[in-house]
Amino acid sequence: MSLQEIADAVVAFVQANQAWAAPVAFALAFGESLAFISLILPSTVILVAIGGLLGASAIDIWPVVIAAGFGGSLGYAISYWIGLYFNDSINGYWPFRDYPEMMRRGREFFEKYGAFAVFLGHFFGPIRAVIPVIAGMAAMRQIPFQIANVTSAFLWAGGVIAPSFLGLAWLAGH
């Protein structure tokens, strides 16, 4: 099954089962924010489509945005704890060993920007896959990490879902 077919199936499921929009958004945002899963899961595209479905049907967007924010925060937190637990030995495990250049660039980005790198990570796919792991490997303090993580996860969730919601709600006259 191709990524496009998976995306189409998820969107069709949410269209037919709109009560599941928030749990699906949570799961997608969690996967999108979990170390390296974001490279193979087309979550952002699906979340944009879900936002549009909600806008066209005048369903409340806030539970979906909140669920996606929590999912994104949890995915990043687990990725951080993976980096904290495995530290530099993580470079010997799949998928990290297969992407040494991404790990190197992520480390350089984190060393340059610190907590701001964690904040920005939710918004940029290539670094989203490694920044929380690198923050854990660097033993970044938990409070600054979580402030950057949670703040950016909720902003990212709203920024991904709300534009298509608002656009289609406007077109549908809701």
Image (cartoon, grey):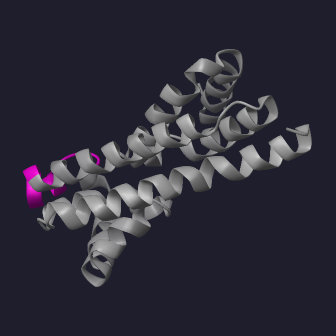
Measured along the vertical axis of the image, is residue 139 above or below residue 86? below
**Number of marks:** 0
> In the displayed structure, does residue 150 sit left or right of residue 136?
right
Residue at 73% across / 44% down in the picture?
Answer: 165
Q: Position of residue 30 (x, y in %)?
A: 40, 40
Identify which residue, 152 or 139, lies in the foreground: 152
Q: Position of residue 50 (x, y in %)?
A: 66, 35
In which quarter of the view is residue 3 placed?
top right
Q: Main secondary structure of the magenta part?
A: helix
Residue at 41% across / 64% down in the picture?
Answer: 121
Q: Position of residue 29 (x, y in %)?
A: 46, 42
> In the displayed structure, does residue 152 sit left or right of residue 169?
left
Measured along the vertical axis of the image, is residue 141 above or below residue 164? below
Q: Which residues are magenta?
A: 85-95
Q: Is residue 93 magenta?
A: yes
| Quarter of the rendering occupied by the C terminus | top right
Residue 35 seen in the figure:
no
Q: Position of residue 117 (x, y in %)?
A: 35, 72
Measured along the vertical axis of the image, is residue 83 above or below residue 111? above
Identify which residue, 138 or 88, lies in the foreground: 138
